[in-house]
Image (spheres, helix red, strand yellow):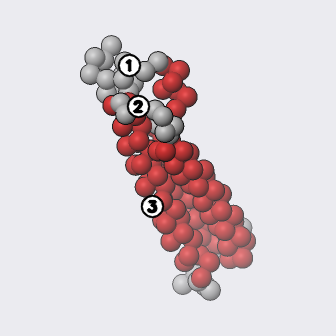
């Protein structure tokens, strides 16, 4: 086992395992925002390419699909932000331990990457919604 108590071995040996799982704040939560943004980015530019190549999609259909995908992506990012905010705040009576500091750091980082990804989703969506043509 890992004696240092880093992210691979859990947060700390002074916390029961069920408390760690209940409180959340795992490093994998950091991947939610970039994954949502990356999938949105690929979908937006794929739909735009299909619309501009005059295949199955028209420009109006692509705009509707992109707006729907953006709404879904922003909802997922809002959910991730709300979860990170809840973890960041935590119970007020909880003592300040290394495990709590790690959870707060992961939650703060997740919150900031979710906000950055939300801005990126909005900026990815704007050209498709504002542009009148494919050129």
Label 2: which secondary element: loop
Quarter residue 105 falls in: top left
Tell me: residue 1, above or below residue 134. above
- Alpha-carbon distance for marks 3 and 1? 34 Å
Q: Residue at x 48, y 34 (%)?
A: 93
Mark toward the viewer: 1 or 2 = 2
Q: Which residue is mark 3?
A: 116
Q: Using a 10 Å C-alpha cutoff, classify the residue at mark 3 as few (fewer than 14 neighbours), some (14 to 19) or many (20 or more).
A: some
Q: Residue at x 59, y 55 (%)?
A: 78
Q: Which residue is mark 1?
A: 14
Q: Residue at x 48, y 26 (%)?
A: 20
Label 3: which secondary element: helix
Residue 116 left/right relative to 43: left
In the rendered image, residue 29, in percent from the top left (x then y), is placed at 48, 41
- Alpha-carbon distance for marks 2 and 3? 31 Å
- Alpha-carbon distance for marks 1 and 2? 12 Å
In the rendered image, residue 86, in percent from the top left (x then y), is placed at 54, 44
Q: Is residue 58 visible?
A: no
Q: Residue at x 33, y 13 (%)?
A: 1
Mark toward the viewer: 2 or 3 = 2
Which mark identifies residue 54?
Answer: none
Looking at marks 2 and 3 on the same chain, the residue that comes earlier in the sequence is marked by 2
| Of 89 and 75, the residue lying toward us | 89
Quarter of the figure that contains the C terminus: bottom right
Label 1: which secondary element: loop
In the rendered image, residue 97, in percent from the top left (x then y), is placed at 35, 30
Q: Which residue is mark 2?
A: 95
């Amino acid at each position: 086992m890992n004696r240092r108590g880093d992210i691979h071995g859990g947060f700390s040996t002074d916390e029961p395992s069920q408390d760690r799982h209940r409180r959340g704040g795992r490093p994998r939560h950091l991947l939610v925002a970039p994954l949502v943004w990356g999938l949105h980015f690929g979908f937006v530019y794929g739909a735009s390419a299909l619309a501009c190549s005059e295949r199955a999609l028209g420009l109006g259909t692509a705009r509707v699909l992109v707006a729907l995908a953006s709404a879904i992506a922003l909802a997922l990012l809002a959910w991730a932000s709300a979860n990170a905010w809840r973890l960041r705040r935590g119970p007020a009576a909880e003592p300040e331990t290394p495990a709590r500091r790690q959870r707060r750091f992961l939650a703060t980082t997740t919150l900031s990457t979710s906000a950055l990804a939300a801005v990126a989703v909005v900026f990815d969506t704007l050209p498709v919604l504002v542009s009148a043509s494919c050129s």
